[in-house]
Image: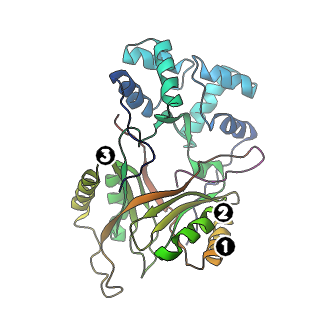
Amino acid sequence: MSVSTSMPDALTPLEREYVLLTQTGLPIISEPYKWLAEQLHITVEETLEMTKDLKSRGIIRRIAAVPNHYKLGYQFNGMTVWDVKDEFASEFGSAIGRLSFVSHCYLRPRHLPSWNYNLFAMVHGKSEQEIKQYQSQIKDLLSEVLETNRSELNPSLKSHDMLNSTQILKKTGLRLNRNGEPKGGTNV
Amino acid sequence: MRNRRCEPVELSTFDKQIINRLQHGLPVVERPFLEIAEELGCSEDALMERLQVLLDEKVLSRFGPMFDAACLGGAFTLAALSVPEESFEQVTEQVNSFEEVAHNYKRNHDYNMWFVVGTEAKDGIEKVIKQIEDKTGFPVLNVPKLEEFYVGLYFNA
C-alpha cells in the first residue's frame, strides 16, 4: 500500500516561477495578471493562457479568496470518520462530498484492528450542536452501507465517530521553496 | 470544542457579498475585479479597497490561486498518534520539531494527535514517519488519501 499521496505531473520552470510568485496571493490591483506577466517576462495573454492551463490540469483549483472561518463564526469543526463497506465507498464518498457543510472528503486506508474507518469528512459549524446535527445527517445517508460487523476483530470498534479538534498544536501553510520542492501541504 | 483563535467579527452586507462571491472563484480575465464588481453592482475600486481591508484584518486569510499541494511535487499524508495525557506535551514538542509536519491538531479520540506530513522527496514520507516513531516511541497511524471526493472551503459569511 502506498504510504503517501503524490502526483507525477511536473511543473515547467516557468510554471514553478508562477507558483512561487502567487502562492502567498495575488496583489489586489485592477490588472493582477499584468503584474504577474511582468514578473514572468511574458505577455498578459500568455499569463492568462498559463493560468487556464494550470486550472485545467487541476494544479490550480481556483482563483479565490480563502476566509478565516473562525472570524466568520465557524468556530467548531469535526472530523467525521466512517467504516463504509468497500464496494460502496467511492459512490457514497462522492455523495457526502457534495454536502454543503462538508469541506474535505477523502477515502483513506484502514489499519485493522486498531483503525477501521476509511471515509473521512470534515464538517464545520457555528456550534457543537450544529456539527453533531451534520454528523447525524451523514449517518442517515450512510446507514445502509456502514460496516457493523467488526466486534469479533476488536470489541471497541464502532462503525463511525467524530473527532473534534480541541487544540491547534501547529499550523504552517504550504510553501514551495525558491530552490526546491514543497515543505508541507494543506489539501492532503 | 471551541478553538479560541479569534472571535467572530461584525461584517457589513457588502463584506458578506464579497466574501461569499470571491470564495467561488474569479474568472481568468485581465480585469477580474471589474467583472465581479459589475456582478455585485459596485465599482471596481470599491471592491478592491474593501477586499484589501478584509485581507488586512485577516477576515480573509489569502486571495489568489489555490494550488493542489500534491500537484506541486513532493508527497503528503495525514498521520496520527495515540499519546497518553502525561506525555502529550512532550510528544507535541517532538512531533512539531519536524519541519515536515505542517499542521497538528489535538482531537478527542484514542488517536488524539493528528498531523499532516509533507516531504520534498516523493519517497520521503516513510522515512519521516519512522523518525517520528523513533523519536516519540509511539507507532504512527499513516492514512494517506486514496481518493478525493471534494475539497472546497465555502463558508457562508
Vertical order, B82 against A25 (above or below): below
Q: Which mark is residue B131?
A: 1
**Crowding near the residue tagged with mark 2, few <14, some 14–19, many ≥20 C-alpha atoms within 10 Å:** few
Indicate whether residue A10 is drawn in magenta: no
Which circle, 3 or 1, is nearer the viewer? Answer: 3
Task: Between residue B89 and residue B68, name the one nearer to us.
Answer: B89
The secondary structure type at the circle numbered 2 is loop
Vertical order, A101 against B109 (above or below): above
Give the residues in magenta. A178-188
The residue indicated by pointer 2 is B98
Provide residue B127's location: percent of width, then percent of height. 68, 70
Q: Amino acid at mark 1?
A: Gln
The residue indicated by pointer 3 is A126
Q: Amino acid at mark 3?
A: Lys
Q: Quadrant of the C terminus of chain B?
A: top left
Q: Residue furthest bottom?
A: A152
